[in-house]
Amino acid sequence: MSKIFLGVRSIIFFIFSIITLNGNPAHSQFDNYYPLLGPDNNVTYYNYPRANAMGGCAINLVDEQSGFVNPASLGFFHMSRNLSFFISDNAMNDNARIEISDDDWKFRSLGFSGGINFHKHARDSNKVYTYCISAGYYDNKLDFGWMLFSNSYGDTWWVNWVDRTKSYSVSIAADVGIRIGLGYNFTKYNRAETTMDNPGYDLLKTDGHSLGLLVELPIFDIWRNQPGTTSASGFKYSLTPSFAYVTSTIDEDEFFNYYLPDVKQIGFSIYFDMKTSKMILFSIRPSYLFQKPSYNLPHETSQDVEWIDKYGVEIGTLGVGYFRIGKWTSMEKSPGSIGFGISLTELKNLILKNRKIHTGYGFINTITNNLNLTVDYAKAYGTNFGETDQLVLRLSI
């Protein structure tokens, strides 16, 4: 057992050593123009606190929100959960506003998804293979507030932008020893502009498409018994590395006002946990992601941006609390992030087990016992737009 703990401590030390290093910044004159509309290096504008607290290492994660950034993860999630929902309504603090902005930015996000499972017994063994078909809907809205613009003649005017995306994801996944998922996401992008003289019109309107792949390879999932005990009362260790790939393309803006980035993302993650038959005692997930935006500019030219590196780690205890930290490369800065998550459902279960309280049977108790309620918080610092805070509520059954 000491070897296991030494290995875990080595992983933690290695990840935190990487996080504390400064990467070479990626330079682009187009950086941060579209905080909601394109997956650029300013991760704070995805209203996805779990991933953002891990430096933006999103595409290897599997939860209620992950289907927006990697549609392949949707099928993974619904292998164990039938329905999910999340909601968030955040106001970015004063440091988040740009110099011409007079208001805080307001970011609202919600989504829901569902899946259907199929099970098949293997012919020559007792193994059961699981297959899943799932679909999800995600709605993000970013209100920039009123911003003061001016020109070389000294004229000034107030403008309000509201960015909105509506996304639809579908996914298929299979667990046949190796877990693999494929997914597709269709997104409608819109930027509405309002001035003092104009009640509002569409400044940008286009569509986006994403294809995602997620592969998990369980290396081991074994029991280590205490002397004189059965496997059910011992400890179980599992180690699962994963690989993810997402390619996103955005159609040309029909008003020809903006040129949005196509993006390729590759992610790696390793998940390790130690648990008993009743609960997860400890877990750790180091993750690394690198992505490359490519801007299709006028006159049939394009500009590639350097690969953007992102590092993050998530450490969990008792399946209840999770601590997260991350770092990524940006323009002339070295942004970082930190955050936590609390599973209110697992906290309730832990309290009931310690007090030996039985919740009973029946339809309502079955629903509440299988309900998963999680709160995530993330704070990003050192970005081109200052500090931001995010809070989200995730619900699944």
Image: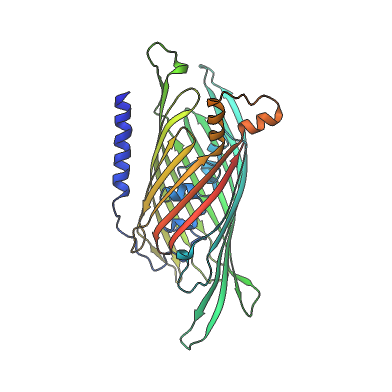
Residue 105 is situated, as x and y percent measured from the top left of the image, at 53, 64
Q: Residue at x 46, y 86 (%)?
A: 152
Q: State the scheme by which the image is colored.
A: rainbow
Where's residue 182, x and y in %?
Answer: 52, 41
**Residue extending furthest right?**
363
Q: Nearer the viewer, residue 43 or 256?
A: 43
Where is residue 329, by image quadrant? bottom left
Q: Residue furthest front?
A: 355
Kindly tell me whether residue 72 is visible in this rendering: yes
Is 280 in front, or is 134?
Answer: 280
Q: Position of residue 7 (x, y in %)?
A: 30, 31
The residue positioned 64% from the left and 33% from the top of the image is 368
Quadrant of the rendering where the C terminus is positioned? top right
Name the residue rendered at 29%, 35% in the picture: 10
Vertical arrangement, residue 280 with respect to residue 342, above or below: above
Q: How many numbered tags mark residues here?
A: 0
Query: Residue 39: in sight, yes or no?
Result: no
Q: Is residue 135 left or right of residue 238?
A: right
Comparing 131 with 190, the one in front is 190
Q: Position of residue 314 (x, y in %)?
A: 41, 41
Answer with left or right where residue 172 lies relative to residue 291: right
Is residue 83 positioned above or below 108 on the image? above
The N terminus appears in which quarter of the rendering?
top left
Which is more toward the observer, 47 or 379? 379
Residue located 56% across and 78% down the image:
158
